[in-house]
Image: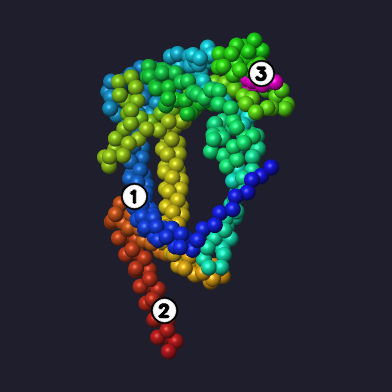
Amino acid sequence: MSNIQVTHTSWFTRLKNALTGIVVGIILIIATSILLFWNESRAVKTYDSLAEGKAAVVAASPDAIDPSLEGKLIHLQGTITPNSDPEDTATGVWAEGAISLTRSVEMYQWVEQEESKTEKKLGGGEETVTTYTYAKEWRSTPQDSSGFFNREGHENPPFPVESAQFTVGDAALGAYTIAGDVLAPMGTSQVIEFSDDDATAIGEALGLGAPTTQIAGALYAGNNPNSPELGDVKVIYARVDLTEASFVAKQAGTGLEEYATSNGYTVFLSSAGLVSADKMFADAQDANVLLTWILRILGLIFMFAGFAASLKILSVIGDVIPFVGTIISFGTGLFSFIATLCLGSVVIALGWFAARPLLSIGILLAAGLIVAGITYLKKKQAAAVA
């Protein structure tokens, strides 16, 4: 079953919103220009920092702390041994020898889906038809039914217990001590299975309020897992294990810290398994390139949105006659696209120039010489033909 809401927006209201959009658009253009400029500088400095780190890193043995390596960038790898066991104290569930223990909770609840369709009207106004549909789904976050468009018959019960992660304080890598929250993201997860008696006890400890059984690795609180009812809950416990790990970081006593390079950037690399320093630096450089392109694309997308918002008022004025507004909207969209490419390219080039002026000047000079050479050859060829 669905519910429909129809709203009308007058031309004057749209005009007022478009005027606000000009301010928002200008702010977006400025902000994304700053982002794109900073991103190029960040990318170059990160590259330089990693290159400096690669040249400075030295191998360290995990068997004993070498005082001569204090404060230096070291490459360390070996077996991970947790110094304690992670435990969910609310239920007593623990994982011997694990780095971390996760508790994932889902509840069967009402979910609202919203779909809107807007149509322009003669005179510049708009009519928006919004359709709200409701379905019961498993979700790991509470769905606040008090904010639903149609709350009647779609009330969700309170979420019984939150998901959580329990991580060891630290672990040993030979003679070194590594913080548990540094290790946990590198581990592999495996679901923990329980007996029926344990499932019942855990359900009672969590206050799930329904018979709890184990179904395919999940603790199910409800009457029938094949036909879930509103408020039924699934809880999954998983252990996170890490057998071996590798690090490139500064030796600080018996632990590891970020290593500051000459440009103020820091190096702290980690990887599951026994990985060479060269491979870790290569992976870090690849991650730097990927992040650079992600930020470039996001910056250009939001810059386009800024230009579009700034020019929105033109299509709103044209919408007094709907098809005229549509034509203007296409034109402003095309202009926004071209303006984004032009301004974005200039900002990115300036970012590179600011980060590496000598290299940028060299590239520009080389490009100028190539163009001049081609132009000279064409003129010489034309003169010979004449």
Whether pointer 1 and pointer 3 mark residues with C-beta atoms closer than 8 Å, the reply is no
As shown in the figure, which amino acid type bears the numbered disc 1? Answer: Trp
Residue 38 is labelled as: 1
Q: Position of residue 87 (x, y in %)?
A: 49, 15
* Figure quadrant of the N terminus: top right
User: Is 239 positioned to the left or the right of 47 in the image?
Assistant: right
Asked if residue 182 is positioned above or below residue 195 in the image, the reply reads below
Asked if residue 144 is positioned above or below residue 40 in the image, the reply reads above
Residue 282 is labelled as: none
**Numbered disc 1: secondary structure:** helix
Whether pointer 3 and pointer 2 mark residues with C-beta atoms closer than 8 Å, the reply is no
Disc 3 marks which residue? 214
Q: Quadrant of residue 182?
A: top left
Residue at 68% x, 27% y: name it: 229
Q: CA distance from mark 1 to mark 3?
A: 52 Å
Q: Position of residue 373 (x, y in %)?
A: 37, 72
Of the numbered discs 1 and 2, the one sitting upstream in the chain is 1
Label 2 crowd (10 A; few <14 / some 14-19 / many >=20) = few
Disc 2 marks which residue? 378
Of residue 150 and residue 295, the one placed in the foreground of this image is 150
Of the numbered discs 3 and 2, the one sitting upstream in the chain is 3
Residue at 36% x, 44% y: name it: 47
Q: CA distance from mark 1 to mark 2?
A: 41 Å
Label 1 crowd (10 A; few <14 / some 14-19 / many >=20) = some
- The reply to whether the magenta stretch includes residue 220 is yes
- The span shown in magenta is 218-223
Of the numbered discs 1 and 3, the one sitting upstream in the chain is 1
As shown in the figure, which amino acid type bears the numbered disc 2? Answer: Lys
